[in-house]
Amino acid sequence: MATLGEVSFYTRRIIKWGIIVVLTVMITPIVWRVAKQIYLRLLPPPPPPPTIRYGKLPTLSFELPTIAYKPQIKLETKTNTLPVLNKIGKVYFVETSKSRILALDKARIKARSLGFSAEPKRESDRIYKFIHPADPSTLTVDLISDKIKYEFDWTNNSEIYTANFTLSRDQIVSESRNFFQNLGLLPSDIPDTNSKITYLSANPPKLTPSIAASEANFAKVDLYRQNRDNLPFVTSGDYSPINITLGSGKFQARKIVSANYNYSKIIETEFATYPLKTTKEAWDELVAGGGIITKTAGSQVVVREISLAYYEPDEPQRFVQPVFVFVGDGGFTALVQAIAPEYIDLSQPK
């Protein structure tokens, strides 16, 4: 029969080893997760191979010519080297309208909400223009792409273009969004936090950037898409596909002097992955005169930043593709198509 001392000894041993087992069971998963995270950080698995689902893609057709502007371009990033960016990028499929059934009726409804009561003038099979019965304004619609262009001739009314702009920034954005929302043209991926305001002064028949908001007669608002895959959207100019220009708040009936809607719906679930050019390949292409310079800045340019973005052209497209964005001193900006050249069909623009 075991003595009291032996029982006490074995009890302490059991408790000791029991605690060790319990702690081991509790700590092992934590240690495993930490070790796995460290391993994956040091030796990440290779990304899945690109799907190349859409075959060869059309070359991007950049709208703005840059033939007359060929600066000397120099690289001066923070590290004085080209950054290493993604090797694979997504290409999204864009929804296109193939039917014109009821499209003209829908356009008439939008036109009436803006005071265009007369029948439109047929410009082509797909383009119709509405003329306002009282004001010098027009509304042009594209029945296939849903592109809309509203224009009001402000140059004949000095009261409008000499009045100081009175709306606050919040009012400007709110008025702009309300205009498109009332037409049923404010997509969910256009957030109110992603807008740009440019104050303009009247210099008939043109509007020029104002030196200060207090000196402005108009304000132009560009509404941009929210970022996708942590990448912004860019265009071939200093504008967005959805933009509007507002006059002084004193003239409610004629507050909107121009508006453009040229939005392409991206199908979020319809995309493919493609190999991208290296940053060096894109840089060499830019230096050789490729891509497009969307904002000039003198005969000698220093590029400070290089990144990726999604490109939105002015005309309807089948795909949304990534581009390299080069930004330098003086606002210099240039774009280069990012998809590797072997996956581009040069015979298919857009």
Image: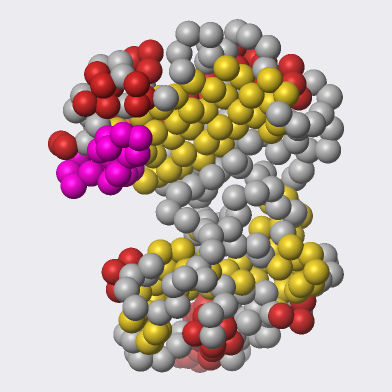
Q: Is 200 colored magenta in this rendering?
A: yes
The coloring applied to the image is secondary structure
Residue 1 located left or right of residue 343: left
Residue 81 lies, with reference to residue 267, above or below; the image says below
Residue drawn at point x = 35 percent, y = 91 percent: 80
Residue drawn at point x = 60 percent, y = 8 percent: 117
Find residue 187 and report its horizontal and vertical position in percent. 58, 36
Q: Residue 195 or 107: which is nearer the viewer? A: 107
Q: Residue 191 or 60: which is nearer the viewer? A: 60
Find residue 56 and report its horizontal and vertical position in percent. 81, 71
Q: Quadrant of the N terminus?
A: bottom right
Residue 208 lies, with reference to residue 30, above or below; the image says above
Residue drawn at point x = 45 percent, y = 77 percent: 70
Residue 182 located left or right of residue 160: right
Residue 319 lies, with reference to residue 15, above or below; the image says above
Find residue 257 and report its horizontal and vertical position in percent. 41, 27
Please tell me whether the stretch drawn in magenta is mainly helix, strand or loop. Answer: strand
Find residue 111 and report its horizontal and vertical position in percent. 60, 17
- Residue 201: image quadrant is top left
Total numbered circles: 0
Residue 273 lies, with reference to residue 36, above or below; the image says above
Q: Quadrant of the C terminus?
A: bottom right
Q: Is 165 colored magenta in this rendering?
A: no
Q: Is residue 48 visible?
A: no
- Residue 186: image quadrant is top right
- Residue 108: image quadrant is top right
Q: Is residue 108 visible?
A: yes
Where does the magenta region start and end?
A: 197-213
Residue drawn at point x = 75 percent, y = 54 percent: 318
